[in-house]
Image: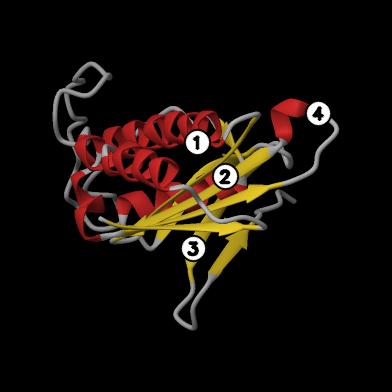
């Protein structure tokens, strides 16, 4: 992974840059897709009244359709990097679980598949799943992680079922069905 460390309002000391390199390179362990990716680390020094907000680090990691980002605040730049690395590690673990748990012995117990009637006008396969409420941003993460062209989810703020789809012209569309 290519890691770029930039300082805003100050020059980044070499030991801080090395710490960022080692902390963020460790993400490849959790998500091997990131080996060919890029990691942009922006470290800034602010004159904040609160001492735990003096150093801020913004990290963006992207590779093969996987995008992770985190922000860390601390009194020292090393602590801000550690905080952001911890957040990114959790995100990478969740992403890895989403990508690689399908088709394996995931957390759900195997249910016998319903016997589908192959006659005309009837579905050949029926899928049942539990819908957890989520935001549109979380649904976008799911559609990217799964590689599907649409995603059905329970819209958290609308409190109803919604469909997020990938548009041919680029971007996403959202369908919010209404019952008569």
- Is any part of residue 83 visible from this angle? yes
Sequence-wise, the earlier of marks 3 and 2 is 2
Please state which of the two labelled residues, at mark 3 or mark 1, is closer to the viewer: 1
| Disc 4 from disc 2: Cα separation | 16 Å
Q: Is residue 39 left or right of residue 161?
A: left
Q: Residues within 10 Å of mark 1 (few under 14, many from 20)?
A: many
Q: Is residue 33 left or right of residue 88?
A: left
Residue 174's x, y, as percent? 60, 61
| Disc 3 from disc 4: Cα separation | 43 Å
Q: Which residue is mark 3?
A: 165
Please state which of the two labelled residues, at mark 3 or mark 2, is closer to the viewer: 2
In the figure, residue 36 lies in which quadrant?
bottom left
Name the residue rendered at 43%, 58% in the picture.
150
Where 89 sits versus 118, above or below?
Answer: above
Please state which of the two labelled residues, at mark 3 or mark 4, is closer to the viewer: 4
Q: Is 170 in front, or is 86?
A: 86
Q: Is 11 in front, or is 64?
A: 11
SS label for mark 1: helix
Residue 115's x, y, as percent? 17, 33
Q: Which residue is mark 4?
A: 50
In the drawing, what numbered circle is on residue 144? none
In the drawing, what numbered circle is on residue 57? 2
């Amino acid at each position: 992974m290519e890691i770029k460390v930039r300082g805003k309002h100050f020059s980044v000391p070499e030991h801080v840059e090395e710490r960022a390199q080692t902390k963020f390179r460790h993400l490849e362990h959790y998500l091997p897709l990131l080996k060919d990716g890029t990691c942009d680390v922006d470290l800034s020094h602010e004159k904040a009244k609160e001492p735990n907000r003096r150093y801020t680090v913004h990290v963006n990691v992207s590779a093969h359709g996987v995008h992770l980002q985190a922000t860390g605040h601390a009194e020292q730049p090393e602590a801000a990097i550690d905080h952001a690395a911890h957040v990114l590690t959790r995100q990478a673990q969740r992403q890895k679980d989403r990508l690689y748990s399908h088709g394996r012995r995931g957390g759900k117990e195997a249910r016998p598949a319903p016997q589908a009637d192959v006659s005309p006008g009837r579905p050949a396969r029926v899928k049942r799943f539990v819908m957890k409420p989520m935001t549109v941003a979380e649904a976008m993460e799911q559609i990217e992680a799964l590689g599907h062209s649409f995603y059905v989810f329970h819209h958290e703020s609308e409190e109803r079922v919604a469909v997020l789809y990938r548009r041919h012209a680029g971007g996403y569309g959202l369908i919010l069905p209404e019952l008569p």
